Amino acid sequence: MVVIRFRAANVLCCYMIFNILYLGKVACEEDGESSIKLTKSEGDDDMPEEREGMIRLSPPKLDDEEQNSPHMPHALRCDGCRAIAHQLSFEFYRRHRVRPKLKRLTESDVMEIVERVCNSHFDNYGLKAVDGVNRLSGPGLETEKSPGMMQGGGRWPVRFQNMCNAYVGELDEEGIYEGYLEDNTLENFLCRREGLFGYCKDTPPTKKEEL
């Protein structure tokens, strides 16, 4: 006679497994379902099934100029000019709001605003692929609200600073401020004339509220 001795722990383990299997079956039957169907995407067992309407976002692909040039790439200078115009006009507007009784800001105010904008107001800008075209994106540009991954940092703040300082070199701070008093968005004054100030002259202006 062969005597099989079961340890108490083994008996308890078997009992627990039996209950789990039995109770699981009962639960499924009570819910009116005898099985659970799992679905997976075709072609790749490891990738989750794509849902309709899902948008895939990818970073912009840079050409050689966009990647290596220390200057603002030519195709992006209109966007760059408009961003600079927005930052300068916004800061002039904000300072006028603080000092409503002044018809003109003081020379020291103007110099301080222009210098600060040109050297520190472009960290929120970068490159974004919009409808398959690389555009600058950031405050004051319609592309800010377009879906896409923005590539910022790196050379971009320096490119904005160089472009902004080029306007200062041509007009000086007071000249830019005079332009603001004539055109409080500064976009036409800086971007829609000729030469250095004509990067957007062939681009239709976007509808935008004046400050």
Image: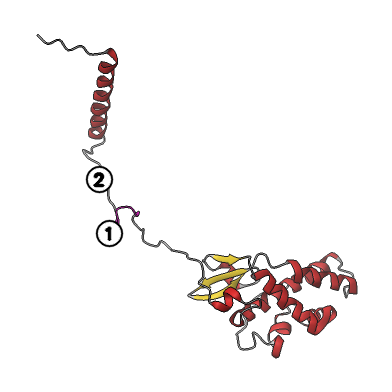
* N-terminal-most mark, 2 or 1: 2
Q: Amino acid at mark 1?
A: Gly
What residue appears at the point 20 percent right and 11 percent down from the top-left corner? 5
What residue appears at the point 57 percent right and 73 percent down from the top-left corner? 67
Q: Residue lying at the far left in this picture: please name it.
A: 1
Using the image, determine if residue 51 lies above or below residue 199.
Answer: above
Using the image, determine if residue 79 lies above or below residue 196.
Answer: above
Q: Tag 2, which secondary structure?
A: loop
* Residue 140 picture location, percent across and down: 66, 71
What residue appears at the point 85 percent right and 79 percent down from the top-left corner? 174
Our reading of the magenta stretch's main secondary structure is: loop
What residue appears at the point 72 percent right and 71 percent down from the top-left corner? 87
Q: In the picture, which quadrant includes the C terminus?
A: bottom right
The residue indicated by pointer 2 is 37
- Based on the picture, tell me whether residue 47 belongs to the magenta stretch: yes
Q: Which residues are magenta?
A: 41-48
The residue indicated by pointer 1 is 43
Q: Tag 1, which secondary structure?
A: loop
